[in-house]
Amino acid sequence: MMDSITITIPKRLKEELDRERKAEGLSRSAIVSEALKKYLTLRKLESLRQKMIPKARAQGIYTDEDVFARVS
């Protein structure tokens, strides 16, 4: 099921969106929808990362390199 919303964006951003839309052959809706999906996924991942930091630090894991060293 699809639903619609109205957003307000700066004119320059709309112009850039329209250039991309024409170049990709996609609708504004498709581009904005994909961008929103990516944004929400990144926010979820960041939230999970923040929750895991105390557990990781308790095991001596402080950096991405520490994680890679443990999993490789």
Image (tube, rainbow, N blue to C red):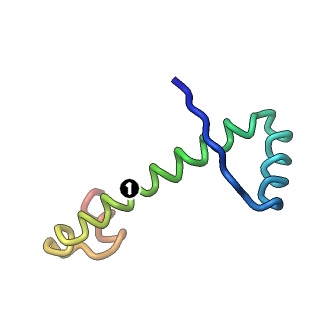
Task: Please state, as top left, top right, bottom left or bottom right, where the C terminus lies in the image.
Answer: bottom left
x and y percentages locating residue 66 in the rendered image: 29, 70
Query: Is 38 on the left or on the right of 59, as rendered?
Result: right
Query: In this orientation, which residue lies closer to the viewer: 33 or 67?
Result: 33
> In the rendered image of this protein, does residue 53 appear above or below residue 16?
below
Q: How many marks?
A: 1
> In the rendered image of this protein, does residue 65 appear above or below residue 23?
below
Secondary element under disc 1, as helix, strand or loop, is helix
> In the rendered image of this protein, does residue 21 appear above or below residue 55?
above
> In the rendered image of this protein, does residue 39 appear above or below residue 60?
above
- Residue picked out by circle 1: 45
Would you identify the image quadrant in which residue 21 lies? top right
x and y percentages locating residue 27 in the rendered image: 75, 35
Query: In this orientation, which residue lies closer to the viewer: 62 or 6?
Result: 6
x and y percentages locating residue 65 in the rendered image: 35, 70
x and y percentages locating residue 31 in the rendered image: 68, 42
Query: Is 51 on the left or on the right of 16, as rendered?
Result: left
Query: In this orientation, which residue lies closer to the viewer: 55 or 25?
Result: 25
Residue at the image position 52 percent from the left and 53 percent from the top: 39
Kind of residue indicated by mark 1: Leu
Residue at the image position 33 percent from the left and 63 percent from the top: 68
Would you identify the image quadrant in which residue 51 lies? bottom left
Badge 1 crowding class, 10 Å Cα cut-off, few under 14, some 14 to 19, many 20 or more, is: few
| Residue furthest out toward the top | 1
Residue at the image position 79 percent from the left and 53 percent from the top: 14
Query: Is 23 on the left or on the right of 38, as rendered?
Result: right
Residue at the image position 20 percent from the left and 75 percent from the top: 57
